Image (cartoon, rainbow, N blue to C red):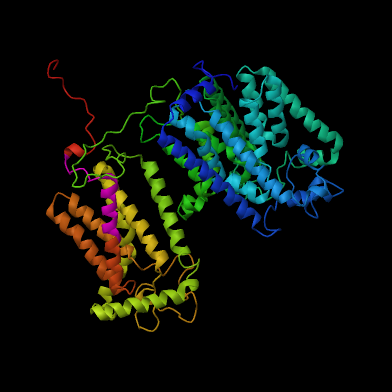
């Protein structure tokens, strides 16, 4: 399989040519990426080995612990949490007690070496021809993505061997010399992880029948050897537990990202669930193999292997998180004909494989099927759904380029500082934008909470001290109007209800509406406005981190009334009804006011009618009244919000230059056909 390049040129010559044209900036980028790889590896080692024994490498304890495989006299499955095949136990059980002392260090460093080898193989297996930049940067990028992926982090933390089967398959497909050796390596991988037998029909259908026969024979020999040595364990694994089903954690647990686990989480059980799982699994396997054969014949060998591996995840009775690396390899597939669409699939794969699902999907009951099956859905999409481009497609190497607005003259010679951030006229990919917004907000929420040490009680004293500082400063400036406004509004029920509703309802609704309208009607202006909002929010996070501040309603000695949350119990560290899941001391700067000011500026600048401009400017004024009247912010918090918004617009200007002027020439171009003046 490794010799099947369709362009007739060996991969090494291409990489040598690319390296010969190396550019200083590319060399610097490559060096930086390798430094990143070293830092990630050092961090992984530090995290694992700095954790007390007994809390790290917990799955490794299934081998070396007091009740582990090395020390039990009976069945392998009488030990703690062992879920591997009998052949797995047969191979690894000869580890001796003398190796146990250094096993933590040796296992961790050995796993890191396996990850590096996996990244090198994946980078070398990219479809040819590859460009100069790809040839130079692919290996460190691949290793970095593997390092930060959840399967590798789990494998390092738990002491798992799940990287070995993936590495054996890649070695068999891309590095082995001769079909027998290739089949031997893939057969060994299947003996360790049985669903990898799906690679046998892939080999057969792609003309490598010798490798397919060798793989099948190796699997049968390894399994037969284990059965001869350990008949009771083999019967227990293959018959009683149906190839491992039921071993380990609950099959309906969130960690099991197979079709079987998804059906159980949907509430199905018994013969109906088993029949449906077998039917769906067979359909996925057939469709995935047909697609894999097509990509193999197209010269996309790594994609063919990744598609088959994703199918193996779906059809496995249990596919635990540390066994899901195949999805990350599927990122090499190219989807979409526009340049703005090209990054959606790789970005989605990287996010799914590196972030917890709660960061990708909001905590809504209707989204539970997506949140609990995120990796499975990605695997199914790669295996049976996504229309990956063929190398014969004209858009494979050259997607439709985006159209850009003409450069706007600036007063400063070096603006924009980042020239490639040009103002695109075409609408960005919606899915990518939604992923960006969701992940950014999830990170924003986590940083807000971490700013007080992970709980409101942890930062209470410092936040109240800062609250007194702000209060004293406002008194010195004669702008301490919060208490008067708060008590006045609290006595007038209609006014209090209006400001409570405004505070709780408009904070997210108005910015999202503005973004949606800009995306649909003004795509060029959308990019400008979105960038300014994102930069302002990042600057606000720095403020939350550096200066935790108690809002007026959480200053028990000043007599403010919390009109939104009601009376708080200040004898309790968490103030009774306040939740632990959000930072109540993220008051400076006020993003309630900052986001509303952003909306007002954008509407005032881009709206064509005066009444719309006036309505846009009215929103930050109403928000300012609401945050003060409800006791949720100081006046100076609003000043801080205005500062970060101004800085967001300023940084956007410096980085990417002035925004395109408002007008028909800067919006989504009209692609309707026009009459030819000569031909009529």
Magenta-colored segment: predominant secondary structure: helix
In front here: 617 or 541?
Answer: 541
Residue located 34% across and 75% down the image: 563
Q: Position of residue 85 (x, y in %)?
A: 75, 39
In the displayed structure image, the side of residue 583 where residue 181 appears, left or right: right
Judged left or right of residue 406, residue 542 is: right
Q: In the image, is residue 631 above or below residue 40?
A: below
In this rendering, is residue 486 above or below 518? below
Q: Residue at x 35, y 57 (%)?
A: 537
Tell me the quarter of the image containing the C terminus: top left
Q: Is residue 491 visible?
A: no
Residue 339 showing in the rendered view: yes
**The stretch drawn in magenta includes residue 645:** yes
Give the residue displayed 44% in from the left and 66% down from the top: 583
Residue at the image position 36 percent from the left and 72 percent from the top? 564
Q: How many marks on residues? A: 0
Q: Position of residue 86 (x, y in %)?
A: 78, 39
Q: Position of residue 47 (x, y in %)?
A: 61, 55
User: What span is in magenta?
Assistant: 644-663
In which quadrant of the rendered image does the N terminus lie?
Answer: top right
């Amino acid at each position: 399989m490794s010799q099947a390049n369709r362009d007739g040129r060996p991969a090494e010559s291409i990489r040598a040519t690319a390296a010969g044209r190396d550019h200083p900036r590319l060399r610097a980028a490559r060096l930086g990426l390798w430094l990143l790889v070293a830092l990630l590896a050092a961090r992984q080692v530090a995290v694992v080995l700095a954790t007390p024994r007994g809390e790290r490498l917990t799955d490794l304890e299934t081998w070396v612990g007091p009740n582990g495989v090395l020390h039990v006299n009976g069945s392998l499955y009488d030990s703690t949490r062992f879920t591997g095949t009998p052949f797995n136990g047969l191979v690894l059980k000869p580890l001796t007690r003398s190796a146990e002392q250094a096993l933590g260090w040796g296992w961790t460093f050995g796993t890191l070496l396996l990850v590096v080898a996996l990244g090198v193989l994946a980078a070398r297996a990219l479809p040819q021809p590859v460009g100069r930049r790809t040839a130079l940067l692919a290996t460190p990028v691949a290793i970095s993505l593997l390092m930060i992926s959840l399967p590798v982090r789990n494998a390092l933390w738990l002491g798992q061997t799940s990287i070995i089967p993936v590495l054996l398959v890649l070695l068999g497909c891309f590095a082995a010399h001769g079909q027998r050796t290739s089949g031997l390596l893939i057969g060994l991988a299947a003996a360790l992880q049985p669903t990898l037998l799906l690679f046998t029909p892939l080999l057969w259908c792609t003309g490598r029948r010798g490798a397919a026969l060798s793989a099948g024979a190796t699997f049968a020999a390894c399994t037969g050897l284990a059965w001869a040595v350990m008949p009771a364990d083999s019967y227990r694994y293959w018959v009683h537990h149906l190839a491992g089903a039921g071993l380990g954690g609950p099959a309906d647990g969130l960690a099991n990202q197979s079709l079987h686990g998804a059906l159980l989480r949907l509430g199905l059980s018994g013969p109906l669930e088993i029949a449906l799982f077998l039917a769906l699994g067979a359909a996925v396997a057939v469709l995935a193999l047909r697609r894999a054969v097509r990509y193999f014949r197209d010269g996309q060998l790594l994609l063919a292997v990744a598609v088959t591996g994703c199918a193996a995840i779906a059809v496995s009775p249990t596919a635990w998180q540390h066994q899901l690396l195949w999805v990350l390899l599927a990122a090499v597939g190219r989807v979409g004909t526009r340049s703005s669409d090209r990054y959606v699939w790789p970005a989605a794969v990287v996010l799914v494989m590196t972030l917890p699902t709660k960061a990708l999907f909001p905590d809504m009951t209707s989204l539970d099927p997506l949140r609990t099956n995120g990796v499975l859905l990605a695997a199914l999409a790669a295996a049976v759904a996504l229309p990956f481009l063929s190398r014969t497609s004209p858009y494979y190497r050259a997607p439709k380029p985006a159209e850009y607005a003409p450069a706007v003259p600036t007063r400063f010679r070096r603006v924009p500082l980042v020239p490639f951030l040009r103002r695109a006229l075409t609408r960005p990919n919606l899915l990518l934008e939604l992923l960006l917004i969701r992940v950014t907000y999830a990170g924003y929420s986590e940083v807000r909470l971490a700013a007080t040490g992970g709980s409101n009680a942890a930062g209470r004293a410092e936040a109240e001290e800062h609250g007194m500082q702000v209060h004293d400063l406002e008194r010195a400036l004669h702008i301490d109007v919060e208490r008067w406004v708060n008590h006045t509004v609290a006595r007038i029920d209609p006014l209090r209800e209006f400001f409570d509703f405004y505070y709780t309802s408009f904070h997210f609704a108005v910015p999202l509406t503005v973004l949606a309208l800009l995306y649909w009607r003004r795509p060029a202006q959308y990019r400008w406005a979105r960038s300014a909002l994102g930069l302002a929010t990042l600057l606000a996070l720095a403020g939350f981190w550096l200066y935790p501040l108690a809002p007026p309603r959480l200053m028990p000695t000043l007599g403010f009334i919390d009109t939104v949350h009601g009376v708080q119990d200040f004898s309790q560290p968490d103030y009774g009804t306040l939740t632990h899941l959000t930072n109540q001391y993220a008051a400076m700067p006020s993003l309630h006011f900052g986001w509303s000011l952003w909306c007002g500026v954008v509407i005032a600048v881009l709206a064509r009618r005066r009444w719309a401009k006036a309505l846009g400017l009215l929103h930050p004024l109403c928000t300012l009244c609401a945050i003060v009247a409800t006791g949720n912010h100081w006046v100076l918090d609003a000043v801080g919000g205005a500062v970060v918004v101004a800085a967001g617009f300023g940084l956007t200007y410096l980085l990417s230059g002035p925004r395109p002027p408002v007008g028909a020439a800067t919006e989504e171009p009209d692609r309707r056909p026009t009459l030819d003046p000569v031909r009529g």
